[in-house]
Amino acid sequence: MSFFGKLYTLQKNENFDSFINSLNLPQDKADALINAKPSQKIEKDGDYYIITTITSKRTTEIKFKNGVEFDEAFTNEITTKNTVTVDGNKFTQVQKADDKIITIIREYSPEQLVVTLTCNFWDGTAKRYYTAN
C-alpha cells in the first residue's frame, strides 16, 4: 500500500480540544496534547502493523496484529485494552479503559491521513488532518 512508511504531519484539528477536555486529564497533560504537532507513520512487518507517533518531546509506537487485542499505556496510571481492525486503508482502533471506550479511525491516502475520534462519554466528533511529507 502506498501509505506504508510515509510520514504524515499534523496540519489542523477540528474539535480536538473538546475531545481532550472530555478525558478529564490534568490540565498540563491536556494542554500538551492539544498543543502538540505530531507526525505519524504506519509500517507493516509480517503480520504486524506499527504506528509510530513523533512529537518534539517523545516518540511512541504501537505494534499490533489485525483484530488481536493488545495493551497500551495511555498514561503512567492508565493502561488500555485495544483492538485495531484493518480494512484496506482504514484502521479502526477501539480503546477501552474501565467503562470508557474511545474509537480512533485512521484513514490513509498517499497525500493525507485523517484521524476521527469519538467516545462513549462525549457526544462530539474530533478530527485531525495530517499531510504526507
Image (cartoon, rainbow, N blue to C red):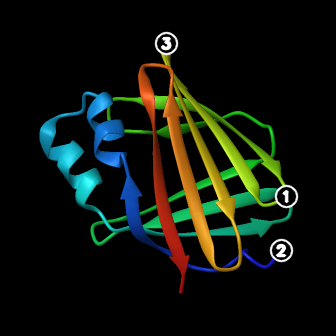
The residue nearer to you, when weighing 3 against 112, is 112
The residue nearer to you, when weighing 6 against 73, is 6
Residue 83's x, y, as percent?
Answer: 69, 36
The residue nearer to you, when weighing 54 against 115, is 115
Amino acid carrying label 2: it is: Met
Labelled disc at residue 96? none
- Mark 3, Cα crowd under 10 Å, few <14 / some 14-19 / many 20+, is few
Amino acid carrying label 3: it is: Asp
- Of mark 1 and mark 3, the one earlier in the sequence is 1
Q: Nearer the viewer, mark 1 or mark 3?
A: 1
Residue at the spot x=49%, y=64% of the render? 129
- Of mark 1 and mark 2, the one earlier in the sequence is 2
- Of mark 2 and mark 3, the one earlier in the sequence is 2
Q: Which residue is mark 3?
A: 99
Residue sitting farthest toward the top:
99
Residue 77's x, y, as percent?
Answer: 32, 30
Query: Quadrant of the rendered structure where residue 15 is?
Result: top left
- Mark 2, Cα crowd under 10 Å, few <14 / some 14-19 / many 20+, is few
Residue at the spot x=48%, y=15% of the render? 98
Label 1 vs label 2: CA separation? 9 Å
Kindly check if marks 2 and 3 are in contact, taking CB atoms under 8 A apart as contact: no
Residue at the spot x=73%, y=59% of the render? 49
Kindly check if marks 1 and 2 are in contact, taking CB atoms under 8 A apart as contact: yes
Mark 2 lies on a secondary structure that is: loop
Question: From the image, which quarter does the N terminus lie in?
Answer: bottom right
Residue 95's x, y, as percent?
Answer: 57, 32
Mark 3 lies on a secondary structure that is: loop
Labelled disc at residue 88? 1
| 46 to the left or right of 7 | right
